Every structure is written in structure tokens, then in C-alpha cells.
Amino acid sequence: MYRLTCRRGFLKSSLVFATTLFSSHNALAKVFDGRPRPEARISLHNLKSDERFTVTYRNEQGVYDSEALKALNWALRCPTTNETTQMDLRVIEYLHRLDLALGGGHEFQIISGYRSPTYNLHLRSESHGVAKHSFHMKGKAIDLAIAGIGLDHLRRVARNLSPGGVGFYPKAGFIHMDSGPFRSW
């Protein structure tokens, strides 16, 4: 009896795991409009670490590559603690859509991706413009620029894509994009 119960439990667990895995990959491939997306590549230059990453994070069938996503999480890590988080795929897809809307093949200059709570608190102590509950601490925001593309144009294109928030910081030299509710400032 014990073996049958364990075997049944194992089979049920395996079925649930396989279903969840298949569903999550399928759901992830349909982040924005319900349609699978073809291969996607993104290039980042982390200005704090001076590291460059070019990653194909979604294959031709629209399936996400978990190792590529880990590399993106590392590229967008907290600059002071080196902590990583699982970046929201919607913000990654937002970057990819922005690149395509600008003609494709751009390298994003990353000013800030994930921020640990400690680092965010430190930034808040230095500037009144840092949110207490920043989307950066949730892996849902990126501050960026693209060499050769004016910030005002970058902001307009990002706002036209409109899946989340877009902030404009011309004096600091970047725009903010997040996967929160649509708003702009």
C-alpha cells in the first residue's frame, strides 16, 4: 500500500510539475498580446560595472531561455550588493519592443536595474526623487539611455508603447521604464 501511495503521489506531483512548467513557458511567451513571440535578443551595457551583455532570451518558438534570463538578471543586478532578483519579463519585453520601435540592434546603457532595499534606502537619503517603494526593488524597473538617441525621442517612443510607467530625467541623462501601471512624468 505504501508503495502505491508514494507512486501515485509521485505521478501526481510529476503531472502537476509538467503542467505548471508547460503553462508557465506558454504564458511567458504571451506576455503582451496573447500571441507567441519569435526570437528576441537584447544588448545591455551596465554603466556601473562596465559589463556588456548580448543575450537571445527567447527562441524562434517563443520559449524563454532560463540561462539567458539568469544572465539578464545578473546584468541588471544591484550595483552595490551584487544581489540579483528575477526581473519581471514584462520590463524585459518592454525593452525589446522599444529597441524594435527604434529600428533594432541598439545597446541599452543601463543606469539602474534591480536595487536592493539597502541601496534604495541609501539613494533616498541622497535624493528626494527616489521612491520608498520603488519598482526597482521588485525587479520591475530599469533606468536607461541609448547612445546616439536623444532622451526626448526615447521617452516619446517608450510612452507610445505604453505598457507601463515612463519617467523622464534629462538632467541625469536617462529615462525610467517600469512594468507598473501606465503613467508618465
Image: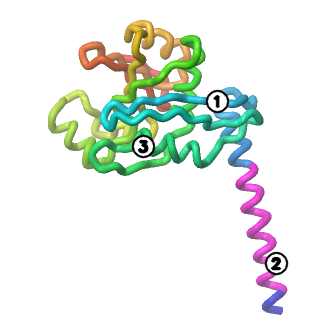
Q: How far apart are marks 3 and 1 (CA)?
A: 23 Å
Residue at 38 percent across and 11 percent down: it is: 151
- Magenta-colored stretch includes residue 167: no
- Magenta-colored stretch includes residue 5: yes
Q: Which amino acid does label 1 sit on?
A: Ala
Q: Give the range drawn in magenta.
A: 4-22
Q: Report which residue position mark 1 lands on.
A: 40
Q: Residue 120 at x, y = what percent?
A: 27, 41
Q: What residue type is labelled 2?
A: Arg
- Badge 2, how many Cα within 10 Å: few under 14, some, many 20+? few
Q: Report which residue position mark 3 lands on.
A: 138
* Residue closest to the eye, 114 or 147: 147
First along the sequence among labels 3 and 2: 2
Furthest-left residue in this view = 126
Element carrying mark 1: strand
Element carrying mark 2: helix
Q: Residue 69 at x, y = what percent?
A: 56, 43
Q: Residue 10 at x, y = what percent?
A: 76, 75
Q: Residue 89 at x, y = what percent?
A: 56, 38
Q: Distance between the residues labelled 2 and 1?
A: 40 Å
